[in-house]
Amino acid sequence: MATAPQAIVALPDISRAVFEWVESVRKLTQPSSVYWCEGSASEIRELTAQLVRSGELTALNAQQFPGCLLARSSPSDVARVEHLTFVCTRSKDDAGPNNNWMAPDEAHAKMRALFSGCMRGRTLYVVPYCMGPLDSPYARCGVEITDSLYVVLNMNIMTRIGRPALELIAHTESFVKGLHSIGELDPARRFIVHFPEELSIESFGSGYGGNALLGKKCHALRIASYQARTEGWLAEHMLIVGLENPRGETHYVAAAFPSACGKTNLAMLIPPASMPGWKVYTVGDDIAWLHPGSDGRLWAINPEAGYFGVVPGTNPETNRNAYEMIRRDTLFTNVALTADKQPWWEGLKSGTPVIDWQGRPYDPSRGPAAHPNARFTVTAKRNPGYSAHTEDPMGVPISALVFGGRRREVAPLVYQARDWTHGVLVGASVASETTAAAVGQVGVVRRDPMAMQPFCGYNFADYWRHWLEMGAKLRKPPPIFHVNWFRRDAAGRFLWPGFGDNLRVLAWMLDRAAGKAAATDSPIGFLPRAEDLNVSGLSINSEALHELLTVDRTLWRKETADMRQYLKQYGERLPAALLDQLAGVESRLNA
Ligand code: OXD
Ligand code: MN
């Protein structure tokens, strides 16, 4: 018997709560039309074609880079703006010294004035999205309203947009409200504000990824970290990578590094030829949502569906998989062009730039051809190392947690925290040289605890307490490590080759986790001896290896004093356990 075709419910009729919010924003922003995104492939093709017709996107060389497009930002809108990013909790102390704070009423009034009538003559796009696999109990949904089609196309790659997300919202009755307008792209009228207590985000005046793709940093880190604290999980700035050893056993590692410090490269690592039998699978390259599992272990999902990665430096030697991945169906932002419209960037090692990232004839005296923070947006499924477990609703079990920073000196290649509590101090102590991912001076060392300085949606003191409590809940907490791939010698040369050879360090960690590898007990934690690392086939001299694995007590005394000073600002709220751990390191250094 034939069944009657099911009537398709119009998108605005799926969730009353979403419809009412869209209506209130429509009245405020006064767009000429409202477009609800269905999320189908044909719709995305049509929206893309619109941007190519309008000249906002340039189609790249179709033979060499099929399906690839180039977008150019306004030159003053090329990175995250931490100084214009606010967390607006009722109490200032709940945002903490780690955030810029504004009172919610003041922030609402400021943003209302900016958004008022800002979409006149424009289309308002409604983008329902899901962070995490649609069938995962850990997934969370949001709706981004934006007047930028470029943002819609990026959100389509980075998240799961459209009807299924809206249906999930109607079912769960909960969603994060994200309101975005590019405004006039005027840095003087640019604000990215978060209301964690209201589960809402308002972003005005920027079209750049971290400021404008609200599912990413704003939702999946700032709002999610706040939600995670009340719900008993962690939202972290971490990649998730699966490592299969030659015996066929796969273990997953989650690793936090500050922006533009190689998370995507580590997540997509290519094993060196001298480590046959190892395989690497990527689950995520930027964000991990970690939950205690019923088995006492820590489990992780990647809330994102794509990569928004740094382009410069990518080449077949540094990361063959990334290089292959971005040769088709990739949206490039702020790269240069060759004469035959192939994308070009510093570190590519082939081709010649003719047009720079601003669309001008390339002139080396004006700086690099591609912007140092030029990006690719690409679906994770294009990654040749895409893990078959990426979409597992419960995620993957984590065997080791890693923190790292970019430091010329002080931090050795790797060390292991003595236990979870010490590991929280190790994470809280991360310091790193700043990069082009955020507006500001590049190369200055700053504290970036857990690589979350720009992304934690509440007071770090409460966040560290939450980390300590999470550890207490885990019957089998993963060991915690710290790495530094960026140590230099006196002449400024990198001591460690990095990239694929980082697997040597990861392999030691997994052996430590399994209780199989040796280490020496140092004042800052457990370090491998040179003979504990697999360096076969690696051309590194023994002095360099020795330097990489040495703790300089004088530098570390300065480091712990600096850390003590840094922690002071968190006052009474700081968990005493962290100061106890710090005192332990100090006394071992002085012993
Ligand atoms: C990013 C960042 O874009 O951290 O991932 O800035
Ligand atoms: Mn990031």
Image: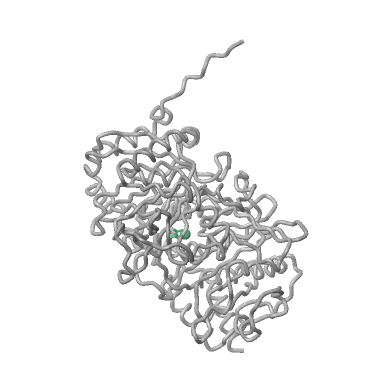
Where does the N terminus fall, quadrant-wise?
top right
Where does the C terminus fall, quadrant-wise?
bottom right
Q: Position of residue 429 (x, y in %)?
A: 51, 73
The structure residue drawn at horizontal position 45% and vertical position 46%, both measured from the top left corner, is: 62
Q: Is residue 560 visible?
A: no
Residue 49 position by quadrant: top left
Image position of 286 with respect to 542: above or below: above
Question: On the picture, is 529 further left or further right than 145?
Answer: right
Question: On the picture, is 502 further left or further right than 219?
Answer: right
The structure residue drawn at horizontal position 32% and vertical position 55%, both measured from the top left corner, is: 73
Image position of 221 with respect to 492: above or below: above
Question: On the picture, is 586 further left or further right than 276?
Answer: left
Q: Please name whichever residue, 253 or 567, is drawn nearer the observer in this view of the structure.
A: 253
Image position of 31 with respect to 404: above or below: above
Q: Is residue 185 visible?
A: yes
Q: Position of residue 219 (x, y in %)?
A: 44, 50
Q: How many marks?
A: 0
Q: Position of residue 422 (x, y in %)?
A: 60, 71
Q: Position of residue 262 (x, y in %)?
A: 52, 65
Q: Please name whichever residue, 239 or 136, is drawn nearer the observer in this view of the structure.
A: 239
